[in-house]
Image: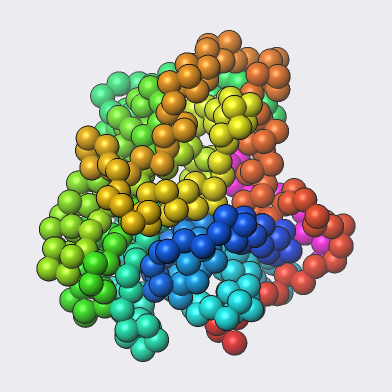
Amino acid sequence: MIIEPRTRGFICLTSHPTGCEQNVKNQIEYVKSKGEIEGAKKVLVIGSSTGFGLASRITSAFGSDAATIGVFFDKPSTEGRPGSPGYYNTAAFEKEAHKAGLYAKSINGDAFSNEIKQQVVDLIKKDLGQVDLVIYSLASPVRTHPDSGKRFKSVLKPIGEVFTNKTVDFHTGNVSEISINPAEGEDIENTVTVMGGEDWKMWMDALKAENLLSEGATTVAYSYIGPDVTKPVYRNGTIGAAKDHLEATAFEITDELKSIGGKAYVSVNKALVTQASSAIPVIPLYISLLYKVMKEKGIHEGCIEQIQRLYSERLYTGEEIPLDEKGRIRIDDWEMYEDVQEEVMELWKTATTENLSEIGDLEGYSNDFYNLFGFKVPGVDYDKDVNEMVAMPSEK
């Protein structure tokens, strides 16, 4: 079938298997071009099919020759209906990993559930024995709690007062003002339950209880801080409360890993185009301006560049990992350079529908968005008939 992008708001309803595969291959080639990393050899990635999770799995496998298990929740293709991009990404990753002689298996299901945790525990026992790195990169708007069965939904809201600022429709380039009402009722609690650190700790408890963590095992979860302009709706809002909980959980997990010399870290990453960030008002405008500034300075990074640098310059240097005053790894350092932020904020003040194409990189934002779904990837012929039915290699 010929697959074209069909969008609704901040999501794309279709995905392209060949484009997704090429995207994965491009990331693999980048990691290989940067040389070997003396990193972990047995890696579990929870939330492994897109964005930072996918980049972590690729960097582990093709930077350190690691055996990887990925946990993801994506729709496989059916006759006449493309699968989700994460499914195609994972199939492409497994295919390339197996070609390179690397162990790679994936489990598709709800990572919040006890059932999927048990499947992963059984697979590690059977195939790997133990893991030495656990990446936690889940980005889900809802969570069914495995103990109570109650379904919680996260919200994106400021806390305390209405937030009003600029935003952009990245499909049209229309800059407008948006107002978001503050959290109410159980909004904060629900968002923390979905996006905080409880599930990360449940995973680590389950692995430790079964002696599946090697001596000195490390676990890393991902977070974001961002600039002052996004703080009311992000870091000081409901999602920020969840990130605070995630970061506090790292210290709890570290305490519990002391017996094996293990440690939990939170890595604060750069603002990038992901399915999650596209849904956050204000962020697309900020990112389009940030991209323009960072590209002009030659310091722009995508997910794979970020994670490769996290591994090679933070996690696996052989030296003590540098942390900020709150114990976090800061791989958002280039984004938060003073000169970068000053220039972005100056552009922010003047950004309008009429000048955004000049002062920002809306095209770069849009391309990255479509790339997430396998579209607009250089070298792919989108007029060509493509087989939407892609099998997962580890399921054959």
Residue at x 47% of width, y 48% of height? 309
Vertically, is 56 above or below 189? Answer: below
Q: How is the image coloured?
A: rainbow
Vertically, is 81 above or below 304? Answer: below
On the image, the x and y values in percent for residue 126 come to 36, 89
Residue 322 placement: quadrant: top left
Vertically, is 340 above or below 190? Answer: above
* Overall secondary structure of the magenta section: loop
Q: The C terminus appears in which quarter of the rendering?
A: bottom right
Give 36 or 240, whichever is nearer the viewer: 36
Residue 298 placement: quadrant: top right
On the image, the x and y values in percent for residue 150 come to 27, 60
**Does 100 appear in magenta?**
no
Residue 181 seen by the camera: no
Q: The N terminus appears in which quarter of the rendering?
A: bottom right
**Does 10 appear in magenta?**
yes
On the image, the x and y values in percent for residue 376 come to 75, 48
Residue at x 36% of width, y 34% of height? 225
On the image, the x and y values in percent for residue 229 come to 42, 21
Residue 171 placement: quadrant: top right
Residue at x 57% of width, y 55% of height? 34
Tell me if 60 is positioned left or right of 300 in this view. Answer: left
Residue at x 63% of width, y 15% of height? 352
Which residues are the magenta region? 1-14
